[in-house]
Amino acid sequence: MTLLKIAQIGNPILRQKARTITAEELASPGIQRFIDDLVETMHDANGAGLAAIQVYRPIRICALEVKDNPRYPYKPNIPLTILVNPVLTPVGDERFENYEGCLSVPDLRGKVWRHAEVRVQAQDRHGQPIDMVARGITAGTYQHECDHLDGKLFVDLVHDPTTFTTWKEFARYREAEVREHVSAIVARYGS
């Protein structure tokens, strides 16, 4: 496997809209190797997810996994999930606010609003259908990764710029409060 370079904020690739891939492309050895590299890169960077466009491939694929993540120690675990051509649809109008960070926006976090529940429709890496509902913090992670596929970064959604913080200052001044907040969201929505 190969570690891939992660594009940083300011790189025009991050503002592109990723294209849908075909079943034939997905089945190709090249795309299957790319998915392995995407996952390996996400793991190496301690990401909760990584979209193909973040590694200079503007195709609609993203990987998600949270497993006792050191960057997000308070996030509920998500099993390794590959989404191909995902479509997210809000379920209801309920939303929550939470701090987010991004591998493409190093050393910065800020508060964004996310839908509390989203229907996730996609294919897995083998072309099998995925149709599920993600809730709470997990729903926020799905929305964050799928936003990348439409050329959006979390910084676009921060409604109050005074919430921007570096990782060090977040850990120092806000993490304890965020842990309680996340626990309340998990208690309410399950994940």
Image (cartoon, rainbow, N blue to C red):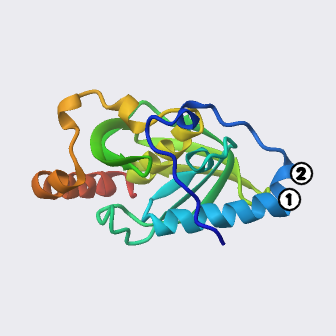
Give the camera-side residue of 120 and 92.
120
Q: Quadrant of the C terminus?
A: bottom left
Residue at 52% of width from left, 37% of height from top? 147
User: Which residue in the protein does label 2 denote?
Assistant: 24
Q: Which residue is mark 1?
A: 28
**Looking at this rendering, what residue extends furthest in the right direction?**
24
Q: Is residue 131 left or right of residue 14?
A: right
Q: Is residue 140 above or below residue 29?
A: above
* Distance Cα–Cα, label 1 vs label 2: 6 Å
Q: Badge 2 local density, few (<14 within 10 Å), some, or many (20+)?
A: few
Q: Secondary structure at mark 2?
A: helix
Q: Quadrant of the N terminus?
A: bottom right
- Which amino acid type corresponds to the residue marked 1 in the rendered image? Ser
Which of the 4 image quadrants contains residue 8? top left
Q: In the shown orientation, is residue 165 left or right of residue 118?
A: left
Q: Are marks 1 and 2 in contact (CB under 8 Å)?
A: yes
Residue 62 position within the rendered picture, expressed as x and y whole percent measured from the top left: 61, 52
Q: Residue at x 18, y 52 (%)?
A: 170
Q: From the viewer's perspective, is 120 left or right of 20?
A: left
Residue 112 in picture, x, y percent from top left: 32, 36
**Quadrant in which residue 172 is drawn:** bottom left
Task: Examine the rendered structure and indicate whether residue 188 appears above or below residue 152.
Answer: below
Q: Amino acid at mark 2?
A: Glu
